Image (cartoon, helix red, strand yellow):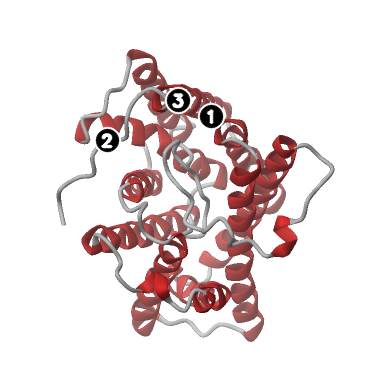
Amino acid sequence: MCGHCVVFHPVQRLPLPMNFPPRFFRRTTPLSSALSGILFMLAAMTIFSLVNVFSKMMVAAYPPAQLFFIRGFGAIATLLPFLARENFAAVRNVPRPGLQVLRMMLSVSDGMLFFTAIKYIPLADATTCYLAAPIFVTAFSAIFLREHVGWRRWSAVAAGFVGVLIALRPTGAAISWPALIALAGCLCQSIFMIVTRYVRGTSNIFLATTQVVGSFVFGGIVSAFIFVQPTWILVVALLISGVVNVAAVLCLNRSLILAPASVVAPFQYTMIVWAIVLGFLVFGDVPSANTMLGAGIVACAGIYIFIREQKVTRREPEPNPPTVV
């Protein structure tokens, strides 16, 4: 929940409890559950995309850490009532504290790198790179966790990596340093997703809160040295964006409750479409043919890996958690 987007892996649980959405999000609908799940996923991706546009506008004038600090306050204020409702039980007896801290640090790094990247490169390029995270997760799982990955998924991983290179080199020149920052952020997010798989015994509300608190604390410390005086209108807008970002995660969580992940997951790639459209309308960014091609390859590779791993995880037992910490 670092703010820019949320991509997920077949065996990753979202960092919010199933009873977390307010009553409005649990209201029944005459639509089928699958269609309702798709609509909630589309709503989540739309909100994330709009927040990304707002963030890109803000990083042009303000340090990313300062935006983290102010927006994090709004998100924390939104989450606190849910922690209080559980009598803050989620904070006590937290398992695997080392991995919890690592996960929080990765979340902060991921968000900071994304905010820095979108200051210099189009939203479409950065979004394409970040939505490749599940592809890298598959590769890392095979290399570092010794999980079995068949030739079909390795082929999709290779195709996805080529897609990222195509998207980040729209002119055929060397990859720019902002693009490398986006790629580094994608790698942080990939490791974050793997770590999340091994803290699934933790309260979901705690997982969500630690991400927000990490961004808030880091942003506050850095802002003490590079603070730029914002207007009150900006402060209010950032606080609202923190609340809105939580609402987007609510929609995402609800989509996975209503429909199988294999049904709704492919629709997360609509963020690429939104990034292209909004980037053109708001910033005048015209995507190159290479960017469009690379984004298409990444989306197809990611969708294929997701569907394939849905089948594999039904047959294979869960891997043992790492012994570190």
Three-letter amino acid code of the residue under disc 2: Pro
Three-letter amino acid code of the residue under disc 1: Ala
Q: Which residue is mark 2?
A: 319
In front of the other: 177 or 140: 140
Query: Does residue 172 show up?
Result: no
In front of the other: 296 or 60: 296
Instruction: Assign a secondary structure to mark 3.
Output: helix
Q: Which mark is residue 305?
A: 3
Residue positioned 37% across, 51% down in the render: 200
Mark nearer the viewer, 2 or 3: 2
Residue positioned 78% across, 51% down in the render: 28
Q: Which quadrant does the C terminus fall into?
A: bottom left
Q: Which mark is residue 299?
A: 1
Q: Which mark is residue 132?
A: none
Residue positioned 56% across, 82% down in the render: 230
> Is tag 2's residue or tag 1's residue first in the polypeptide sequence?
1
| Residue 75 located left or right of residue 103 | right
Label 1: how many residues lie within 10 Å, few (<14), some (14-19) or many (20+)?
Answer: many
Residue 64, percent from left and from top: 45, 67
Three-letter amino acid code of the residue under disc 3: Ile
Whole-angstrom CA distance, mark 2 to mark 3, is 18 Å
Mark nearer the viewer, 1 or 3: 3
Taking 164 as reference, is 275 above or below it? below
Taking 263 as reference, is 78 above or below it? below
> Is tag 1's residue or tag 3's residue first in the polypeptide sequence?
1
